[in-house]
Image (tube, rainbow, N blue to C red):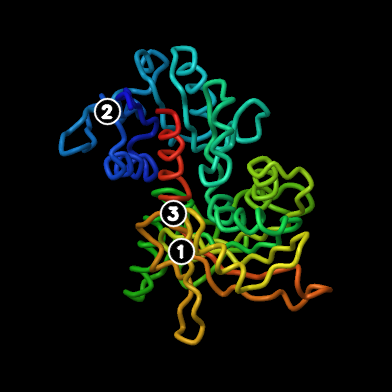
Amino acid sequence: MSNKVVAILGATGVVGQQMLQCLEERNYPVERLVPLASARSVGKTVTFRGEQVPIVEATPEAFEGIDIVLGAAGDGTARELLPEAVKRGAVCVDNSHAFRLEPDVPLVIPEINADDVKWHNGIIANPNCATIIGLVPLWPLHQAAGLTRIIASTYQAASGAGKPGLDELQREMAALAAGEPVGDTKPFAYQLAANLIPQISSFKDDAYTDEELKMGREGRKIMHLPSLRVNCTCVRVPIMRSHSESITAEFERPITPDEAREILSAAPGVRVVDDPASLRYPMPLETSDQDLVFVGRIRRDTSAPDGVNALTLFCCGDQIRKGAATNAVQIAELLV
């Protein structure tokens, strides 16, 4: 395994900082780290393997000599700079939305479609966080019974709005605890503390939001299931960093809850937490700051016509780690 010169585009953000930690934790073969950010961050440093590494301004020229770029910047920055990195010989693993549905860009969850990395043309896309957390447990069930339809409700943490979202939720909770008015709620449209907001991103087709459409569009591409039917409702909830999802899945063939638990117990990236008698089920508090998707509340879908070809489950996963940074580093591991 040869060492790589690795750049992180957006190294000062929440996901960029988590990428740094994941590279360390997973002992990725970094010969040299180049943290990239906007001009206003030049002069600052990031900590990597016990050393202070100076931030470099993100310009096209900054990608000279870079082998791997981990993208943790917004869509506009990604579209502007990542093609420049590719021109200079780098392979980019991008966490933005910019390239996910481009036909020549693999969209990869390593537990599902690692082989798609082989046909990249310089850019590999990291899927949406809710897509990753939902599909990691659905994929092994699909392999067993043939997935045909997903109905999902997601309960997405403040971290999905980046550092501004985390800071705002903390500020609102402190204001409420002190008996003070919450005031301005940006980046959220409404107060999030002691509330939930049934809208994430802007409304698009048929009154669905862009976030809600991602699971279907991305899921069909990742799992190579062009006919997969998906209905999704995305809700922002006052949780710091772990997304939760309630999913009903329909299959071509019968599958029982016990069979599903057995399959998921052996599946990569999954931990089954499903003991209702002991009040054990996935929760955001237990899934934060780690990389597994917890799955539980596995039961028959009693509304299904036949009662045997559909299951309902609940899953949770850390949005910043497996939903973003860890998945990107796992993809980078496929490149060495």
Q: Which residue is mark 2?
A: 55
Give the crowd class for mark 1: few <14, some 14-19, many >=20 residues within 10 Å: some
> CB of mark 1 within 8 Å of CB of mark 2?
no
Query: Mark 2 belongs to which amino acid?
Result: Ile
Residue 189 is situated, as x and y percent measured from the top left of the image, at 55, 57
Tag count in the figure?
3
Quarter occupied by the C terminus: top left
Residue 276 is situated, as x and y percent measured from the top left of the image, at 51, 83
Query: Residue at point 38% right, 73% down?
Result: 176
Give the crowd class for mark 3: few <14, some 14-19, many >=20 residues within 10 Å: many
**Residue 331 in the figure: left or right of residue 42:** right
Residue 119 vs 141, above or below: the answer is above
Cα distance between the residues tagged 1 and 2: 37 Å
**Residue 287 in the figure: left or right of residue 51:** right
Query: Residue at point 35% right, 57% down?
Result: 289
For residue 159, which numbered disc appears in the image? 3
For residue 271, which numbered disc appears in the image? 1
Residue 298, located in which quarter of the rendered image?
bottom right
Query: Mark 1 belongs to which amino acid?
Result: Arg
For residue 87, which numbered disc appears in the image? none
